[in-house]
Amino acid sequence: MTTAIVLAGGATDEAWRRASGAAMRALVPIHGEPMYRHVLRALQGVPEIGRILIVGDVPPGEGYEVLPPPDGLMESVQRGLEASMTDSVLFVSVDVPFLTAESVRFFLEESLRSGAALTYAVVPAALCREKFPQMKRTTVRLREGELTGGNLFWARREVALRELPRLRTLYAARKQPLRLALYVGVGILIRFLLAQWVSPRFLSVRDVERRAEQLLGVPARAILCPYAEIGTDIDTLQQWQQVLRH
């Protein structure tokens, strides 16, 4: 069985708080229900998920457990891992209200089948534009096509706990280009930039996977998912307003 961990931290900004009446993203209403309830419903529809932990300030309820959120995303990841009783752990961000049981099950099954210790969901950008044309997404160009990051991450619990310090270092460097280059490697960053501005042939998904494996010392895979729901999150006031209009 798998433990699902919903990362439900994250406050709304002042404008979003005034418009929605919610201080936390998890509680922002989408079509009459707080955002976390939409994610919860998708997870509860997957038979392979035996336990659901929500790390965040949400009301207690049936079918899930609430863990008080610490400060910081990686600290929330650690809290969820420490509370898990299974080796298979699925992380989900709380701001994907369109998530479905079918899309979650696809990612989970492909992750388990991959033989990797860590996996991350990616989605073709064209699928997101087709299904949610009003929603803008950050995308990257790789040899396999234009992709956007998903909001699902899967790990073997023991491996994730062991590699947490490295994951925390990488996460902390994400907005510091020089530090990120020193950690990830100047070579692959140059190839990444060339893939974005010159030609996607300079970098493939497998190239990125290999570098992740070198950094972490464990098999890592990107799972290509044919579900726009996985790659469409609501993390700004503007995106929320767009959803309400459609």
Image (cartoon, grey):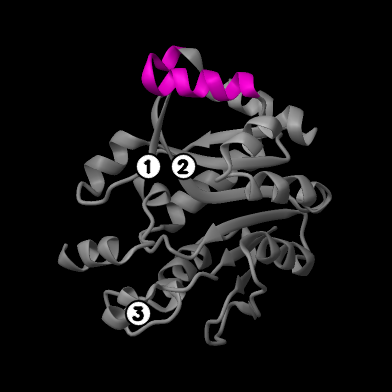
Question: Which residue sits at x=59%, y=49%?
Answer: 153
**Three-letter code, disc 2:** Gly
The span from disc 1 to disc 2 (Cα, nearest Å) is: 8 Å
**Three-letter code, disc 3:** Arg
**Three-letter code, disc 1:** Thr
Say whether residue 227 is visible.
yes
Q: Is residue 147 above or below residue 44?
A: above
Give the x, y percent position of residue 156.
75, 48
Give the x, y percent position of residue 47.
57, 60
Residue interval drawn in magenta: 186-201
Q: State yes or no: discs 3 and 2 in contact (Cβ < 8 Å).
A: no
Judging depth in this view, the residue of 65 and 63 nearest the camera is 65
The quarter of the image holding the C terminus is bottom left
Q: Is residue 184 above or below residue 112?
A: above
- Which sits earlier in the primary sequence, circle 3 or circle 1? 3
The span from disc 3 to disc 1 (Cα, nearest Å) is: 24 Å
* SS state under label 2: strand
Label 1 sits on residue: 138
- Which sits earlier in the primary sequence, circle 1 or circle 2? 1
The quarter of the image holding the N terminus is bottom right
Classify residue 169 as left or right of residue 106: right
Residue 188 among magenta residues: yes
Classify residue 221 as left or right of residue 33: right
Q: Which mark is residue 149?
A: 2
Q: State yes or no: discs 1 and 2 in contact (Cβ < 8 Å).
A: yes
Question: Which residue sits at x=52%, y=63%?
Answer: 43
Label 3 sits on residue: 17
